Image (tube, helix red, strand yellow):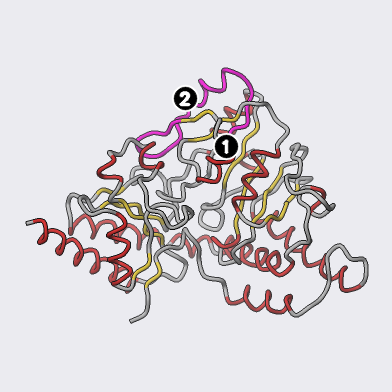
């Protein structure tokens, strides 16, 4: 029986067209910094992909796209490379790489639904200008944040806004120019592009200094020879993903059917963030009394891949800081798993998940009796 992959927020399979394009580029020579014909051809590929990424995220005219080795590096460049006011405010539910970049940042709390508390943000901004970092959609719950309101409050206080948009681009509309976002992070492997490829999008005149120095690549924002094949794959993947937003949206019905059946099987099951807007593919749900690591292993044995919260913690399963920030009790948070659907997820795969959930719930209920 085929393996059911329901961990698309961790990574999603490469699109066939992306694989083909990357293989073709890998067969070519040419450093984008070289001035000969092959170097110029490589440069054209890089710049074409840069335009694809810029167009996909609504980068304002005059802004820059900086290609990086991944979302972690892009977030680090935004938070540590920005020449901005000394204060940094970040939401309590940011990805670990944002939390680690500036551990001294002041924390913006979130509501019980996992939405950033705008009143609290406004109070914090009253103490002076800052860099405000709020993700567009949470990687664990899928909850979409009110970025336009965050930008409105921040700009009124003379502050800049960084938005980790990794989990929203290709899943729901995201337009930097329309939102007024100053810096945004995007990652290729959440879109059907290659792992190890991301970008930081900079609105015009945002003052960022390189963290990786040594050469003049990426307009001086990041030294090092560009990953041409990865960049080409990124450009194709993001263009395709944004063009398929309506197709991706159908996953909401699958996700909601799954959630309803899990709660029907186990009335004590808790779905987190359900009252807030969410990206269509994400379900964070707890099976009370069964630890998340036990569930992940049991579902893996049943041929289903999913995760307990973020997949970026070196394989460790721990109580989610996101659920903790939402006020979820530790004993419930430790039983939460993340189920994230992909563009090719089928009804039959959802049925497999429902069946496996029911089997595990039955076994754990019997063993507890």
**10 Å neighbourhood of mark 1: few (<14), some, or many (≥20)?**
many
Q: Residue 6, image x and y in percent?
A: 39, 65
Magenta region: 109-132
Dot 2 lies on which element? helix
Q: Residue 14, image x and y in percent?
A: 56, 71
Closer to the camera in the image, 134 or 248:
134
Quadrant for the C terminus, please.
bottom left
* Nearer-N-terminus badge (1/2): 2
Report the number of numbered marks.
2
Q: Is residue 272 left or right of residue 110?
A: left
Q: Residue 85, image x and y in percent?
A: 68, 26
Dot 1 lies on which element? strand
Q: Assess whether residue 277 is covered by the magenta stretch.
A: no
The residue shown at (54%, 60%) is 190
Q: Which residue is mark 2?
A: 120
Quadrant for the N terminus, please.
bottom left
Would you place residue 163 above or below residue 343 in this image? above
The residue shown at (29%, 41%) is 330
Report how far apart the C-alphas of labels 1 and 2 lie in the structure.
Answer: 14 Å
Q: Which residue is mark 1?
A: 133
The residue shown at (28%, 72%) is 302
């Amino acid at each position: 029986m085929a393996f059911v992959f329901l961990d698309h927020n961790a990574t999603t399979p490469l699109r066939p067209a992306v694989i083909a394009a990357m293989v073709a580029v890998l067969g070519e020579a040419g450093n984008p910094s070289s001035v000969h014909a092959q170097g110029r051809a490589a440069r054209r590929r890089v710049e074409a992909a840069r335009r694809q990424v810029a167009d996909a995220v609504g980068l304002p005219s005059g802004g820059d796209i900086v290609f990086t080795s991944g979302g972690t590096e892009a977030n680090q460049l935004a938070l540590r490379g920005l020449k901005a006011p000394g204060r940094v405010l970040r939401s309590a539910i940011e990805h670990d790489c944002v939390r680690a970049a500036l551990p001294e940042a002041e924390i913006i709390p979130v509501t019980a639904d996992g939405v950033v508390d705008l009143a609290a943000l406004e109070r914090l901004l009253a103490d002076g200008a800052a860099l405000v970092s709020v993700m567009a959609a949470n990687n664990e719950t899928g909850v979409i944040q009110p970025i336009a309101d965050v930008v409105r409050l921040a700009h009124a206080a003379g502050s800049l806004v960084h938005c980790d948009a990794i989990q929203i681009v290709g899943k729901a509309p995201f337009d930097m120019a329309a939102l007024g976002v100053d810096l945004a992070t995007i990652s290729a492997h959440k879109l059907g592009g290659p792992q190890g490829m991301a970008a930081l999008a900079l609105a015009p005149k945002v003052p960022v200094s390189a963290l990786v120095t040594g050469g003049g690549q990426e307009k001086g924002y990041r030294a090092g020879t560009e990953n041409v094949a990865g960049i080409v794959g990124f450009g194709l993947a993001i263009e395709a993903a944004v063009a398929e937003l309506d197709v991706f949206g159908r996953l909401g019905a699958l996700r909601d059917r799954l959630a309803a059946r899990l709660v029907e099987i186990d009335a004590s099951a808790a779905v987190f963030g359900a009252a807030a807007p969410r990206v269509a593919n994400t379900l964070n749900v707890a099976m009370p009394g069964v630890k998340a690591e036990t569930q992940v292993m049991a579902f893996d044995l049943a041929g289903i891949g999913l995760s307990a919260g973020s997949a970026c913690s070196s394989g460790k399963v721990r109580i989610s800081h996101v659920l903790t920030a939402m006020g979820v009790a530790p004993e419930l948070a430790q039983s939460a798993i993340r189920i994230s659907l992909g563009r090719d997820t089928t009804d039959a795969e959802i049925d497999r998940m429902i069946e496996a959930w029911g089997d595990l719930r039955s076994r754990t209920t019997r063993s507890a009796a």
